[in-house]
C-alpha cells in the first residue's frame, strides 16, 4: 500500500481529473527540499538524478511554476536546450488566481491545443490545491528529432510527481490517501507523447509492451509495437526459437536508440518465458489427448494458453488529436485498421 496525495490535476489537453503525487522519503526528501529551495531563491535548480535536466521557474505566492528543460551540447561545443513540460502548483486559494493566469499564459507554447474545459476552468479559477500541466511544443519536435528518449520523459514525469508530492508535504493542504484503496477509475495514467504517437498508428494498441494473442495454429502470437527515434512504428514478432522479426514493409530506414534496443532485449526475454510455458502446456495437452484416446475418454475443447493472452487496455485518442499528431510528425497508420 502506497500513501499519496490526490488533488485535481488539470492537463491542458484533457478533461479534469485527479492526479496522484507521492511524498518524497529518506534521501529523496532532502533532494526535493534542496530543489524547491533553489527554485524559490534563484529560479532554477538541477533535476535530481537526471543529468542534463534543470527546472526553471518562480514562486507564485506559496505556490510556484516550473518548466523542465533538457540541456545538451554537440560534438563541436554548440549548446542546445529544449523545454519539456511546464507545471503549475497552487496550494491555497490565495494563490489560485495567479497560478491559473500563469497557466493560461503558457497556452501559446503548448504542444497541443487546450481542451475547452481546461480553458473554462482556468478562466474561472479552480479551487486549490491543484496542479496545471502544459507539455511544451518543443517536446514533440525534440522527440521526433531524437533529442529526448521515452525513458527520459518517464524520468521527468516521475520527478514532477515526487516534486509536487514534496510541496504538498510542506504545504499540508491535502490528506494522504492509500493508493491501493482507490477505485481504478481514480487512477489516472500519465501518457507520453510517444505513447500517443504509437497509439495513433496502431488504432489504440499500446506500444513498447509485450502482446500475446491466440494464433491460428494453436500456438500464440507474441509481438510488440515499437517506435523508432522518429516515432515511426513497426511490429516486432518474437518467435518460439528466439528469432526476432521486424516488419519493415514500406519503410526506407529505421533508427533505434540505445533505450529502444534495451527495450527489445527485455521484450525478447519476456517472450522466451511465454514460449517456454506455452510449449510445456501444449506438450501436456498432447499427452492428455493421447491418454484419453487410449482410455476412450473424451476431452472437452479448451485452450490451455488462455491465461497467457494479454488484455492491455487501449489508449483512446480522439480524432482531432490524432490528426494533429499525423500532421506534425508525418506518421503512417499502416497498423490502424480503423482509420
Image (cartoon, helix red, strand yellow):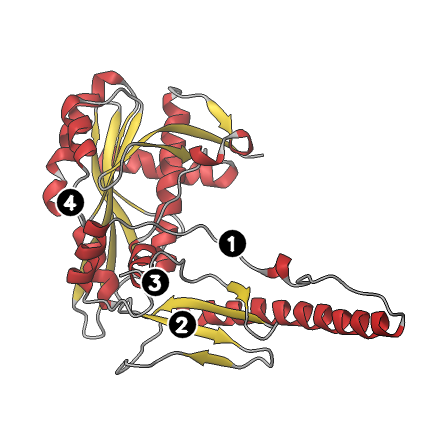
Q: Is residue 79 visible?
A: yes
Q: Nearer the viewer, mark 4 or mark 1?
A: 1
Contact between marks 4 and 2 (CB within 8 A): the answer is no
Secondary structure under badge 4?
A: loop
Left or right of residue 298, residue 43 in this image: left
Residue occupied by mark 2? 235
Residue 212 circle label: none
Q: Considering the image in quadrants, where does the N terminus appear? A: top right
Which disc, if any, is residue 202?
A: 3
Whether residue 298 sits left or right of residue 173 in the image: it is right
The location of residue 97, given as percent across then percent down, is: 17, 22
Q: Residues within 10 Å of mark 3 (few under 14, many from 20)?
A: many
- What whole-number distance in Å separates the C-alpha atoms at marks 4 and 2? 30 Å
Please tell me which of labels 4 and 2 falls first in the chain.
Answer: 4
Residue 80, position as x, y percentages in the image: 18, 62
Label 2 vs 1, first from the N-terminus: 2
Tell me whether circle 1 and circle 3 mark residues in contact (CB < 8 Å).
no
Dot 1 corresponds to which residue?
311
Residue wearing tag 4: 113
Rounded to the nearest whole Å, what is the CA distance between mark 1 and mark 3? 15 Å
Closest to the observer, 9 or 167:
9
Describe the element under mark 2 as helix, strand or loop: strand
Task: Indicate whether 107 appears above or below 196.
Answer: above
Question: On screen, 90 above or below 237?
Answer: above
Q: Residue at x 25, y 17 (%)?
A: 93
Q: Earlier in the sequence, mark 4 or mark 3?
A: 4
For the residues labelled 2 and 3, the Cα–Cα distance comes to: 10 Å
Amino acid at each position: 500500500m502506497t500513501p499519496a496525495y490526490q488533488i485535481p490535476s488539470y492537463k491542458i489537453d484533457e478533461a479534469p481529473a485527479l492526479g496522484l503525487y507521492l511524498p518524497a522519503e529518506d534521501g529523496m526528501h532532502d533532494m526535493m527540499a534542496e530543489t524547491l529551495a533553489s527554485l524559490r531563491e534563484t529560479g532554477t535548480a538541477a533535476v535530481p538524478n537526471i543529468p542534463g535536466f534543470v527546472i526553471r521557474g518562480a514562486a507564485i505566492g506559496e505556490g510556484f511554476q516550473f518548466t523542465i528543460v533538457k540541456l545538451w551540447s554537440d560534438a563541436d561545443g554548440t549548446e542546445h536546450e529544449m523545454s519539456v513540460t511546464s507545471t503549475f502548483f497552487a496550494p491555497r486559494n490565495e494563490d489560485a488566481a495567479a497560478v491559473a493566469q500563469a497557466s493560461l499564459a503558457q497556452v501559446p507554447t503548448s504542444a497541443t491545443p487546450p481542451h475547452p474545459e481546461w480553458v473554462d476552468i482556468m478562466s474561472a479559477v479552480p479551487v486549490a490545491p491543484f496542479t496545471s500541466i502544459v507539455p511544451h511544443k518543443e517536446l514533440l519536435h525534440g522527440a521526433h528529432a531524437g533529442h529526448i528518449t521515452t525513458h527520459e520523459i518517464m524520468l521527468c514525469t516521475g520527478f514532477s510527481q515526487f516534486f509536487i508530492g514534496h510541496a504538498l508535504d510542506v504545504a499540508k493542504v491535502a490528506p494522504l490517501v492509500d493508493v491501493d484503496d482507490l477505485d481504478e477509475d481514480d487512477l489516472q495514467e500519465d501518457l507520453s507523447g510517444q505513447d500517443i504517437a504509437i497509439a495513433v498508428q496502431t488504432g489504440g494498441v499500446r506500444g513498447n509492451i509485450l502482446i500475446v494473442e491466440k494464433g491460428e495454429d494453436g500456438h500464440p502470437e507474441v509481438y510488440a509495437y515499437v517506435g523508432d527515434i522518429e516515432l515511426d512504428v513497426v511490429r516486432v514478432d518474437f518467435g518460439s526459437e528466439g528469432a526476432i522479426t521486424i516488419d519493415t514493409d514500406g519503410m526506407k530506414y529505421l533508427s533505434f536508440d540505445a533505450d529502444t534496443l534495451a527495450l527489445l532485449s527485455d521484450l525478447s526475454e519476456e517472450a522466451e518465458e511465454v514460449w517456454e510455458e506455452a510449449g510445456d502446456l501444449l506438450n501436456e495437452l498432447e499427452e492428455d489427448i493421447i491418454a484419453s484416446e487410449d482410455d476412450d475418454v473424451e476431452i472437452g475443447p479448451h485452450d490451455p494458453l488462455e491465461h497467457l493472452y494479454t488484455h492491455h487496455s487501449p489508449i483512446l485518442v480522439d480524432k482531432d488529436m490524432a490528426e494533429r499528431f499525423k500532421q506534425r510528425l508525418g506518421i503512417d497508420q499502416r497498423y490502424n485498421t480503423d482509420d
